[in-house]
Amino acid sequence: EVQLVESGGGLVQPGGSLRLSCAASGFTFSNFWMSWVRQAPGKGLEWVANIKQDGSEKYYVDSVEGRFTISRDNAKNSLYLQMNSLRAEDTAEYHCTRGGWIQPRAQVSWGQGTLVTVSS
Amino acid sequence: IQLTQSPSFLSASVGDRVTITCRASQVISSYLAWYQQRPGKVPKLLIYDASTLQTGVPSRFSGSGSGTEFTLTISSLQPEDFATYYCQQLNSYPLTFGGGTKVEIK
């Protein structure tokens, strides 16, 4: 069974930093594209970033480009999101997602999420 | 690429046929996915590449369309289908979601 477990969320002041982690199990992590998707409280979904199997390609939504960095450690079956210069509008539940075999950009499996709150 | 879903809200009864539309601001070929999010739950992938049903998804769900206009159809609404539905374009970065369609019980 695919499992994705996020951690690292919390309360942070504007301008601060957080590092989110996602521990993956139940599948061969190194075979799949991975993404982060966020959802602000009571709002819709927003794709944040994704990373290729070997880490050689990374893509970001414009609003986080230059502030967030996605990375992975295939030896540890882990995905990360380093978030710097955080803003109030980054407040959201952050979900780790796995891509598909046939459609790697689709969000096939989702973690339960970790809540990031940016507030003074 | 912006995705516009319509309607944003619909009220329907069990057994109804329901259609949700997603329009893209640019041509995205068939690179569109649909997700279902029940209250308090994480989203679930229903359909990818416009019309391919994800494994395990009931056959009452179907998707169609290409280019800029897409539809998600639920042939006979079941109690567990009351949820919010999102489309997502997979054609180009940044990947984007539609604003969602909330399906409620009439």
Image (cartoon, helix red, strand yellow):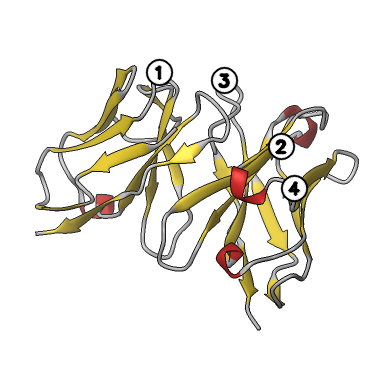
**Mark earlier in primary sequence (2, 4):** 2
The residue lying toward the viewer, choosing from B14 and B92, is B92
Q: Which tag, 3 or 2, sits closer to the chain's start?
A: 2
Q: Position of residue A75 (x, y in %)?
A: 90, 40
Tag 1 near tag 2, CB within 8 Å: no
Of discs 1 and 2, which sits in the foreground? 1
Cα distance in 3D space between marks 4 and 3: 30 Å
**Residue B17 occupies which quadrant of the picture?**
top left
Find the distance from the CA under tag 4 to the CA under tag 1: 30 Å
Q: CA distance from mark 1 to mark 3?
A: 14 Å
Residue carrying label 3:
A102
Between label 4 and label 1, give the one nearer the viewer. 4
Relative to A99, does residue A17 appear above or below in the rendering?
A: below
- Residue shown at the point (40%, 67%) measured from the top left: A42
Give the number of the disc on residue B30.
1
Which label number is shown at residue A66?
4
Q: On the image, which quarter does residue A38 sit in?
A: bottom right
Q: Do the numbered discs 4 and 1 sit on residues whose CB atoms are within 8 Å?
A: no
Q: Secondary structure at mark 4?
A: loop
Q: Which residue is mark 2?
A: A27
Tags 2 and 4 touching, CB below 8 Å: no
Pointer 2 local density, CA inside 10 Å: few below 14, some 14–19, many at least 20:
few
- Measured as percent of width and height from the top left, residue B94 is found at 57, 35
Residue A13 visible in image: yes
Residue at figure coordinates x 75%, y 66% from the top left: A8
